[in-house]
Structures are given as C-alpha cells and as structure tokens.
C-alpha cells in the first residue's frame, strides 16, 4: 500500500478499497500498540487525534481515511484541536491540510500491520505493554500533552509509576571524560542510596556511568531506548542493559520491538526522560548535545534542572556552563544537592555547608580586631597592638587577656604576638 495512491488534500478524492486489519482494531490496547508503529514518536497530530478520540476510534478513523479520504477529512474530526505552526490561525482548511499530510505518513504503515506479533516478541522476553490507562503508567508523561507516547514497551520491572515516583534523570555526553564518568557514577550511587530511581538513556558515556552507579548501590535504574527493547542498543552496552533488567530496573521504549534507532528517535526519546523524572541533571554536555535538549524540555515541563560544572577549558562541560549562565539550571556538585533538587521539601534538604571551624570564629569584634593586629613573629608592645587595632590601651589589655586565656595569644616580657611557636603562621 503506497501513500502516493491517495490524494488526501482534495474534497473529492476518490474512494479506495477498504483496508482490512488482521487484529481486533476495537481493542484499545492493540490499537495503542498499533499507533506506536503507525506514527513516529512525538507526532503531535497523531497525539492530538488519539488523546481526543481514543486509540481505537482514531484507528477506525484512519482506516476510513485510507478508504475514502475526502469524506473522512470533512467529518467531525476537524473539530479536534490540532497543533500547527506557531501563529497559524485555527481554520478548518488548516486542520484538513494537517490531517491530510499526517494520513499520508501513516497510511503506508497500515500494510501488514499487526501488533500481536510484536506483543508475542515482548512476551517471550517477559515484557509488558503499558498504555496511559494502566495504573503502572508514569504519570509525568501526561504533562507532554499531544507529544505523550501512545504506549510503552517495557522489559524488567513493569511498574514504571512506582519507579518514577522518586526519580532523577542523570544525562550527559556520550564522549564523556573520566571526570564526567566519575561524577555521574558518584551522583547515581548517592541517589540510589537515598531511594531515588536513576533514569537515563542507556548510551555510552554519562548514561552508562549513571546506570552503573545505581546498580552498584543496588538501586533501580530505568533506561529509555530510541529503538525496540528486543535488541539492546548500543551493542556495547548489552550486558549493562541486561543487568538493568535483571536487577529490578527497566528498559523502556515507545516504539515496538524491531524498530531501529535513528537520530530523530533519539531526540524524541529525550522528552520521555525529562517528563518521567522529577528532575534532570546534566553532568557533561558540549554546546551541541542531546543532553541539552533533555534539560531544556525538563525546564519547559517545570521540572528542576541541575548542571555539574567542569573546568572552564573543557569543551565537554561547555553545555553545562551555558545552562548555568542562562539560568536554566542550578549548580549541583553532589548527591545531597541533587536530592534536594528532586526530592520532597524539607525531607531531602541538603545539609548546610560549613567550612572548618576556627577558634577565632567565636571572638567578638574587639577580639577579632586584636587578633588581626597581633604580629605573627616579632612580639609588639601593648601600645603598638592597641594603636594598630584602633583601641585604647586599657581596652586592648582586657581583650588580649581574653586571647591569652583562649590560647590565641602569648605574652613575652610585656610584649604580645599570636600563639604558635613564637608567632608561627595561624589562619585567621
């Protein structure tokens, strides 16, 4: 069946023979699975159609459009609010043109369409198909609106709602540095220890380090793939993804088994990582990086975004610095700070950061002025110390007595200096 057979833009397009499907198109689960094959990820027209009509009625409409496009494109479906170019007026003609173009994309994939085959492949791998009506569906994906997936193909732990309830996406460059991989591993390990699910994309570099860190702590991790879950990609991470499935984690895709990963699917996959997680942290990213698209999508969804700073000379951290400079991300350096970003208010607050406590921290104003005035080496007279501190000699003598008792000053032959081997260097 070829899309070229259909003139979908005219009002009087000729009717074509009915398209028959080998499966029950009224079954909502099979229909959702079918749409995950028919439409590419993040197809906004398909998403609007399915969200308004339901997967099965939308599929029935598509079959009608394949048989008689002119009639289908004049029906009530034009009342569905279809997304279009920014600023374009919502007119019936514009809706019809967008639907016509979309049907032209979908109709060629009706040929030999049968999601039962892919479901059998999934079942042989102990997987499950989730639809938005399933209680195991991660609720954050609903925030994507018409860009939400039609179904999720899952291997491993099927309850994605529970996994996503307390989760952080840790993403970054494939060509990561040793610094980036070290930081990603430490973040993931710390987050897993704090009860967070680590979400990432299963790729080389930062993604793989994040998954390994979570696994090392015995915590769950979710890998969202751009291709089918029947074949782990990239091949070099096959054993890692197998461990994710075996160790209470999940490998997930919105495209059916047998689907190949390619660039647009990777970019579309990033929106799922952002929406499923409560926060996104970018560890390393160049100026042009898929991880930045994940971070920006998370910001659009009002999810917290964190970025790990790196050396200012490192191209691998340039994207993180852009996020920080543009105010899209909060600077994070360890798991405590990430947990505060993604966790529950109060319960996951990072402990206050304090420098090393010094004895001089407890001094009052007079004591600090005298401490600053005391010489480090050659002792000075009371009058010289008082003059330097801007105090009267009597006031200085009382304050120096306090420093003497605190072990911060020494007196020798009526002259004064800081304590520590004849005024050896002391940090003040």
Image: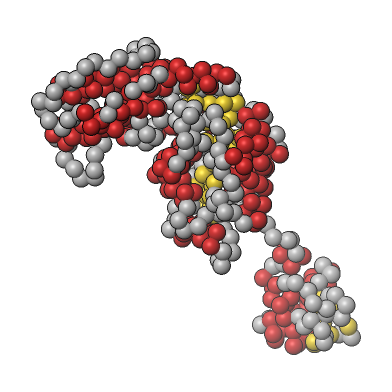
325 vs 68, nearest the viewer: 68
Q: How many marks?
A: 0
Q: Position of residue 134 (x, y in %)?
A: 46, 19
Task: Name the residue at 24% across, 45% down.
Answer: 86
Q: Is residue 174 visible?
A: yes
Q: Residue at x 60, y 26 (%)?
A: 156
Q: Is residue 325 above or below residue 265?
A: below
For residue 254, side relative to residue 78 (left or right): right
Residue in the image at 57% along x and 26% along y: 155
* Residue 172 pos. (x, y %): 54, 49
Q: Is residue 76 at all visible to an observer of this figure?
A: no
* 181 with respect to 37 (left or right): right
**Which residue is at a point 64% across and 56% down the rendered structure image?**
179
The outermost residue toward the left is: 12
**In which quarter of the view is residue 399 placed?**
bottom right
On the rendered structure, is 24 left or right of 332? Answer: left
Closer-to-camera residue (49/241) = 241
Against 278, is 16 above or below? above
> In the rendered image, which quarter contains the N terminus?
top left
Residue 97 locus on image (x, y percent): 18, 35
Instruction: From the top left corner, tell me how far across and down residue 196 is, in percent.
Output: 61, 36
Image quadrant where one finds the C terminus: bottom right
Compare residues 127 and 16 and report the one nearer the observer: 16
């Amino acid at each position: 069946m070829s899309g070229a057979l259909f003139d979908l833009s005219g009002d009087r397009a000729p009717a074509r023979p009915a398209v028959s499907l080998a499966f029950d198109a009224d079954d909502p689960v099979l229909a959702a699975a079918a749409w995950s094959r028919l439409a590419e990820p993040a197809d906004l027209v398909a998403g609007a159609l399915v969200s308004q009509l339901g997967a099965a009625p939308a599929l029935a409409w598509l079959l009608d459009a394949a048989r008689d496009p002119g009639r289908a494109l004049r029906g009530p479906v034009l009342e569905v609010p279809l997304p279009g170019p920014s600023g374009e007026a919502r007119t019936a003609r514009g809706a019809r043109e967008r639907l016509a173009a979309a049907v032209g994309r979908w109709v060629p994939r009706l040929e030999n369409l049968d999601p039962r085959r892919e479901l059998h492949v999934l079942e042989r791998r102990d997987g499950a198909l989730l639809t938005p009506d399933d209680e195991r569906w991660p609720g954050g994906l609903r925030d994507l609106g018409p860009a939400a997936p039609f179904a999720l193909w899952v291997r491993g732990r099927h309850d994605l709602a529970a996994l996503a309830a307390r989760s952080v996406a840790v993403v970054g460059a494939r060509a990561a540095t040793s610094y980036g991989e070290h930081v990603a591993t430490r973040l993931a390990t710390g987050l897993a220890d704090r009860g967070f699910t680590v979400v990432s994309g299963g790729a080389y570099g930062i993604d793989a380090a994040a998954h390994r860190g979570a696994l090392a702590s015995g915590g769950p991790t979710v890998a969202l793939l751009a291709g089918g879950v029947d074949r782990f990609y990239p091949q070099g991470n096959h054993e890692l993804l197998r461990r994710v499935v075996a160790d209470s984690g999940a490998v997930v895709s919105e495209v059916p088994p047998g689907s190949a990963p390619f660039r647009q699917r990777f970019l579309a996959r990033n929106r799922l990582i952002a929406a499923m997680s409560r926060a996104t942290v970018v560890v390393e990213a160049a100026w042009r990086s898929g991880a930045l698209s994940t971070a920006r999508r998370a910001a659009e969804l009002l999810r917290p975004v964190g970025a790990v700073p790196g050396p200012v000379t490192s191209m691998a951290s340039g994207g993180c610095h852009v996020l920080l400079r543009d105010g899209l991300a909060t600077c994070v350096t360890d798991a405590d700070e990430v947990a505060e970003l993604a966790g529950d208010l109060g319960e996951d607050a990072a402990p206050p950061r304090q420098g090393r406590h010094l004895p001089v921290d407890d001094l009052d104003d007079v004591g600090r002025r005298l401490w600053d005035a005391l010489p480090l080496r050659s002792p000075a007279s009371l009058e010289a110390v008082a003059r330097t501190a801007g105090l009267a000699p009597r006031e200085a003598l009382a304050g120096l007595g306090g420093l003497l008792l605190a072990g911060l000053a020494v007196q020798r032959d009526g002259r004064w200096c800081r304590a520590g081997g004849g005024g050896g260097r002391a940090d003040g």
